[in-house]
Image: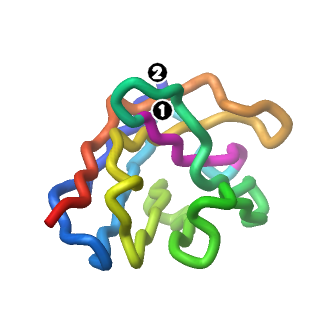
């Protein structure tokens, strides 16, 4: 059974940084793409960043140049480094796992809250 556990969320001031982590278990981590999605109150869930099984990355336009997704296959972990945070980045951030050709993947974590506020 696949489990994805996120951590690293919290309250940060505008312009600040956070690093999210997601540890995966129950699957062969290196075979799958990993992604981060987010959902703000009253809005649909949206894709933030994705990294393929081979390490190719792509980002939502709204976070390009500010967020960086990476993975550590030895630790079954995917990271999201978030810099220059804005109030509009406030949302619950979800980790997602799936094949390289399907978006989103079929497995989700429970999410971690990120709040950007002064």
Estimate the x, y position of residue 10 in percent, counting from the top left.
18, 56
- Residue 32 falls inside the magenta stretch: yes
Residue shown at the point (48%, 32%) measured from the top left: 26
Residue range of the region highlighted in magenta in the rendering: 31-39
SS at circle 1:
loop
Main SS, magenta residues: strand
Residue 86 is tagged as none
Residue shown at the point (46%, 28%) measured from the top left: 43
The chosen color scheme is rainbow
Q: Is residue 24 above or below residue 104?
A: below
Query: Which quadrant holds the C terminus?
Result: bottom left
Residue shown at the point (61%, 43%) measured from the top left: 47
Assess disc 2: are there few (<14), some (14-19) or many (≥20) residues with their C-alpha within 10 Å of its C-alpha.
few
Q: 56 or 72: which is nearer to us?
A: 56
Q: Which residue is mark 2?
A: 1
Q: Is residue 23 left or right of residue 73?
A: left
- Residue 33 falls inside the magenta stretch: yes
SS at circle 2:
loop
Estimate the x, y position of residue 98 in percent, counting from the top left.
67, 34
Rounded to the nearest whole Å, what is the CA distance between mark 1 and mark 2? Answer: 5 Å
Q: Is residue 14 left or right of residue 37?
A: left
Q: Which residue is mark 1?
A: 26
Q: Are marks 1 and 2 in contact (CB under 8 Å)?
A: yes
């Amino acid at each position: 059974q696949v489990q994805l556990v996120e951590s690293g969320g919290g309250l940060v001031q505008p312009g600040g940084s956070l690093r999210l982590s997601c540890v995966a278990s129950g699957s062969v981590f290196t075979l799958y793409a990993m992604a981060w999605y987010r959902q703000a109150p009253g809005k649909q869930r949206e894709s933030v960043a994705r990294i393929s099984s081979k390490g190719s990355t792509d980002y939502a336009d709204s976070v390009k140049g500010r967020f960086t997704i990476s993975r550590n296959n030895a630790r079954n972990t995917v990271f999201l480094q978030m810099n220059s945070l804005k109030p509009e980045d406030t949302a619950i951030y979800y980790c997602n796992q799936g094949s390289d050709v399907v978006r989103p993947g079929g497995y989700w974590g429970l999410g971690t809250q990120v709040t950007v506020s002064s």
